[in-house]
Image (cartoon, grey):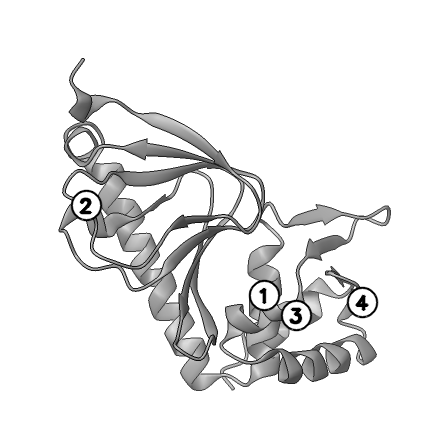
Protein backbone atom coordinates (compact mmCIF):
# COMPACT_ATOMS: atom_id res chain seq x y z
CA UNK A 1 0.00 0.00 0.00
CA UNK A 2 1.44 3.38 -0.99
CA UNK A 3 1.88 6.18 1.51
CA UNK A 4 -0.54 8.28 -0.56
CA UNK A 5 -3.37 5.89 0.30
CA UNK A 6 -2.75 5.38 4.03
CA UNK A 7 -5.44 6.79 6.32
CA UNK A 8 -4.55 7.52 9.92
CA UNK A 9 -6.67 8.38 12.94
CA UNK A 10 -5.86 10.52 15.95
CA UNK A 11 -7.70 11.64 19.09
CA UNK A 12 -7.81 15.22 20.41
CA UNK A 13 -8.85 16.59 23.79
CA UNK A 14 -11.19 19.58 24.28
CA UNK A 15 -9.35 22.79 23.48
CA UNK A 16 -6.61 21.06 21.52
CA UNK A 17 -5.75 22.69 18.19
CA UNK A 18 -5.78 20.32 15.23
CA UNK A 19 -4.87 22.78 12.45
CA UNK A 20 -3.18 26.18 12.56
CA UNK A 21 -3.31 29.06 10.07
CA UNK A 22 -0.77 28.91 7.26
CA UNK A 23 -0.05 27.30 3.91
CA UNK A 24 -0.63 23.53 3.93
CA UNK A 25 2.38 21.31 3.36
CA UNK A 26 2.49 19.64 -0.08
CA UNK A 27 1.54 16.27 1.42
CA UNK A 28 -0.96 17.57 3.99
CA UNK A 29 -4.16 15.48 4.11
CA UNK A 30 -7.80 16.47 4.33
CA UNK A 31 -9.46 15.59 7.63
CA UNK A 32 -12.76 13.92 8.42
CA UNK A 33 -14.29 14.04 11.87
CA UNK A 34 -15.13 10.56 13.14
CA UNK A 35 -16.59 11.57 16.50
CA UNK A 36 -16.89 14.67 18.67
CA UNK A 37 -17.13 18.31 17.57
CA UNK A 38 -14.56 20.59 15.93
CA UNK A 39 -14.73 24.37 15.66
CA UNK A 40 -13.32 26.28 12.69
CA UNK A 41 -12.39 29.66 14.12
CA UNK A 42 -10.68 32.87 13.01
CA UNK A 43 -8.79 34.90 15.62
CA UNK A 44 -7.64 38.44 14.83
CA UNK A 45 -4.52 40.20 16.10
CA UNK A 46 -6.38 41.53 19.14
CA UNK A 47 -7.56 38.07 20.14
CA UNK A 48 -11.16 38.50 18.99
CA UNK A 49 -12.56 35.15 17.85
CA UNK A 50 -15.23 34.33 15.29
CA UNK A 51 -16.50 30.79 14.74
CA UNK A 52 -16.83 30.18 11.00
CA UNK A 53 -18.52 26.78 11.31
CA UNK A 54 -18.84 23.67 13.42
CA UNK A 55 -17.69 20.33 12.02
CA UNK A 56 -19.82 17.31 12.93
CA UNK A 57 -19.01 13.60 12.57
CA UNK A 58 -18.75 12.57 8.93
CA UNK A 59 -17.83 16.07 7.76
CA UNK A 60 -14.50 17.20 6.29
CA UNK A 61 -12.21 20.09 7.21
CA UNK A 62 -8.74 21.22 6.19
CA UNK A 63 -9.96 21.38 2.59
CA UNK A 64 -7.34 24.04 1.81
CA UNK A 65 -4.99 21.11 1.18
CA UNK A 66 -6.95 20.32 -1.98
CA UNK A 67 -5.62 23.45 -3.67
CA UNK A 68 -2.67 24.46 -1.50
CA UNK A 69 -4.51 27.59 -0.35
CA UNK A 70 -3.40 29.48 2.73
CA UNK A 71 -5.50 28.71 5.79
CA UNK A 72 -6.63 31.74 7.77
CA UNK A 73 -8.21 29.92 10.70
CA UNK A 74 -7.72 27.35 13.43
CA UNK A 75 -9.43 23.96 13.72
CA UNK A 76 -9.97 23.20 17.40
CA UNK A 77 -11.56 20.23 19.18
CA UNK A 78 -14.45 21.36 21.37
CA UNK A 79 -15.03 17.89 22.83
CA UNK A 80 -13.09 14.65 22.90
CA UNK A 81 -12.75 14.10 19.16
CA UNK A 82 -11.43 11.46 16.80
CA UNK A 83 -10.16 12.62 13.41
CA UNK A 84 -9.25 10.67 10.29
CA UNK A 85 -6.49 12.06 8.07
CA UNK A 86 -7.10 11.18 4.42
CA UNK A 87 -4.44 11.78 1.75
CA UNK A 88 -5.77 14.11 -0.95
CA UNK A 89 -5.09 11.67 -3.77
CA UNK A 90 -6.93 8.86 -2.01
CA UNK A 91 -9.89 11.09 -1.16
CA UNK A 92 -10.31 12.41 -4.69
CA UNK A 93 -10.14 8.90 -6.05
CA UNK A 94 -12.43 7.10 -3.63
CA UNK A 95 -14.95 9.67 -2.37
CA UNK A 96 -15.26 12.60 -4.81
CA UNK A 97 -19.05 12.88 -4.57
CA UNK A 98 -19.06 12.84 -0.78
CA UNK A 99 -16.30 15.44 -0.70
CA UNK A 100 -18.11 17.79 -3.09
CA UNK A 101 -21.40 17.40 -1.20
CA UNK A 102 -19.65 18.22 2.05
CA UNK A 103 -17.94 21.29 0.60
CA UNK A 104 -21.26 22.56 -0.78
CA UNK A 105 -22.91 22.06 2.63
CA UNK A 106 -20.06 23.90 4.36
CA UNK A 107 -20.39 26.77 1.90
CA UNK A 108 -24.14 26.96 2.51
CA UNK A 109 -23.51 27.02 6.26
CA UNK A 110 -21.08 29.89 5.75
CA UNK A 111 -23.61 31.84 3.69
CA UNK A 112 -26.26 31.38 6.38
CA UNK A 113 -23.87 32.52 9.11
CA UNK A 114 -22.98 35.68 7.15
CA UNK A 115 -26.66 36.40 6.54
CA UNK A 116 -27.44 36.12 10.24
CA UNK A 117 -24.53 38.38 11.17
CA UNK A 118 -25.72 41.05 8.76
CA UNK A 119 -29.49 40.88 9.17
CA UNK A 120 -30.30 39.62 12.66
CA UNK A 121 -30.12 41.06 16.15
CA UNK A 122 -27.78 39.39 18.61
CA UNK A 123 -30.68 37.85 20.52
CA UNK A 124 -31.87 36.04 17.40
CA UNK A 125 -28.35 34.88 16.53
CA UNK A 126 -27.87 33.43 20.00
CA UNK A 127 -31.15 31.53 19.69
CA UNK A 128 -30.02 30.11 16.33
CA UNK A 129 -26.60 29.12 17.70
CA UNK A 130 -28.08 27.31 20.69
CA UNK A 131 -30.47 25.39 18.45
CA UNK A 132 -27.60 24.42 16.16
CA UNK A 133 -25.49 23.17 19.07
CA UNK A 134 -28.24 21.06 20.65
CA UNK A 135 -27.59 18.36 18.03
CA UNK A 136 -23.82 18.21 18.64
CA UNK A 137 -21.50 16.46 21.08
CA UNK A 138 -21.70 19.53 23.36
CA UNK A 139 -25.31 18.68 24.22
CA UNK A 140 -26.97 16.18 26.51
CA UNK A 141 -30.47 15.81 27.99
CA UNK A 142 -31.48 16.54 31.60
CA UNK A 143 -33.94 14.54 33.72
CA UNK A 144 -36.84 16.50 32.24
CA UNK A 145 -35.80 15.76 28.66
CA UNK A 146 -34.54 19.28 27.99
CA UNK A 147 -31.37 19.91 25.93
CA UNK A 148 -28.40 21.03 28.02
CA UNK A 149 -25.44 22.54 26.15
CA UNK A 150 -22.01 22.65 27.78
CA UNK A 151 -20.82 26.05 26.58
CA UNK A 152 -19.09 29.10 28.03
CA UNK A 153 -20.18 32.64 27.24
CA UNK A 154 -16.84 33.15 25.48
CA UNK A 155 -17.56 30.22 23.16
CA UNK A 156 -21.09 31.47 22.53
CA UNK A 157 -19.77 34.97 21.77
CA UNK A 158 -17.39 33.54 19.16
CA UNK A 159 -20.25 31.58 17.61
CA UNK A 160 -22.43 34.66 17.12
CA UNK A 161 -19.81 37.30 16.29
CA UNK A 162 -19.98 39.30 19.52
CA UNK A 163 -18.10 39.75 22.81
CA UNK A 164 -18.61 37.95 26.10
CA UNK A 165 -19.89 40.94 28.05
CA UNK A 166 -22.68 41.65 25.56
CA UNK A 167 -23.56 37.99 25.18
CA UNK A 168 -23.82 37.60 28.95
CA UNK A 169 -26.40 40.43 29.06
CA UNK A 170 -28.48 38.87 26.29
CA UNK A 171 -28.25 35.40 27.83
CA UNK A 172 -29.60 36.93 31.04
CA UNK A 173 -32.45 38.47 29.09
CA UNK A 174 -33.28 35.13 27.43
CA UNK A 175 -33.24 33.46 30.87
CA UNK A 176 -35.60 36.06 32.38
CA UNK A 177 -37.99 35.57 29.48
CA UNK A 178 -38.05 31.81 30.05
CA UNK A 179 -36.29 30.64 26.86
CA UNK A 180 -33.26 29.19 28.65
CA UNK A 181 -31.75 28.50 32.05
CA UNK A 182 -28.13 29.57 32.39
CA UNK A 183 -25.70 27.86 34.75
CA UNK A 184 -21.94 27.68 35.15
CA UNK A 185 -20.56 26.50 31.80
CA UNK A 186 -23.92 25.23 30.59
CA UNK A 187 -27.20 26.45 29.12
CA UNK A 188 -30.49 24.54 29.35
CA UNK A 189 -33.02 25.11 26.58
CA UNK A 190 -36.35 25.43 28.41
CA UNK A 191 -38.45 26.74 25.49
CA UNK A 192 -37.21 25.22 22.24
CA UNK A 193 -40.27 26.36 20.26
CA UNK A 194 -39.76 29.93 21.43
CA UNK A 195 -36.08 29.80 20.47
CA UNK A 196 -37.04 28.49 17.02
CA UNK A 197 -39.39 31.45 16.57
CA UNK A 198 -36.62 33.85 17.60
CA UNK A 199 -34.06 32.21 15.32
CA UNK A 200 -36.35 32.45 12.28
CA UNK A 201 -37.10 36.15 12.67
CA UNK A 202 -35.36 38.18 9.95
CA UNK A 203 -34.32 40.92 12.37
Q: Residues within 10 Å of mark 1 (few under 14, many from 20)?
A: some
* Secondary element at tag 2: loop
* Numbered tag placed on residue 153 in the rendering: 3
Q: Nearer the viewer, mark 2 or mark 4?
A: 2
Q: Nearer the viewer, mark 2 or mark 3?
A: 2
Q: Nearer the viewer, mark 2 or mark 1?
A: 2
Question: Which one is nearer the viewer's eye here, 115 or 44?
Answer: 44
Question: Which one is nearer the viewer's eye here, 39 or 23?
Answer: 23
Q: Quadrant of residue 108?
A: bottom left
* Numbered tag placed on residue 155 in the rendering: 1
Q: Earlier in the sequence, mark 4 or mark 1?
A: 1
Q: Earlier in the sequence, mark 4 or mark 3?
A: 3
Location of residue 50 with respect to 189 vertically, above or below:
below
Q: Are marks 1 and 3 in contact (CB under 8 Å)?
A: yes
Location of residue 93 with respect to 172 vertically, above or below:
above
Task: Find the residue positioned furthest to the right.
Answer: 143
Q: Earlier in the sequence, mark 2 or mark 3?
A: 2
Q: Which residue is mark 4?
A: 181
Q: Quadrant of residue 127?
A: bottom right
Q: Residue at x 33, y 40 (%)?
A: 31
Q: Residue at x 62, y 78 (%)?
A: 164
* Secondary element at tag 4: strand
Relative side of 27 to 130, left or right:
left
Q: Are marks 4 and 1 in contact (CB under 8 Å)?
A: no
* Secondary element at tag 1: helix
Measured as percent of width and height from the top left, residue 89 is found at 14, 32
**Between marks 2 and 3, how big is the CA–CA gap?**
35 Å
**Between marks 4 and 1, how big is the CA–CA gap?**
17 Å
Measured as percent of width and height from the top left, residue 95 is found at 23, 32
Amino acid sequence: MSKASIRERARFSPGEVILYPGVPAPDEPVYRLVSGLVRIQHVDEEGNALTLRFVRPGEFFGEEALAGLERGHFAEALTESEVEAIPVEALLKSEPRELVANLVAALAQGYERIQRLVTQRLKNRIAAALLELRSTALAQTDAEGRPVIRLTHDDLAAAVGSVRETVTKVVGELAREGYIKSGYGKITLTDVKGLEDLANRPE
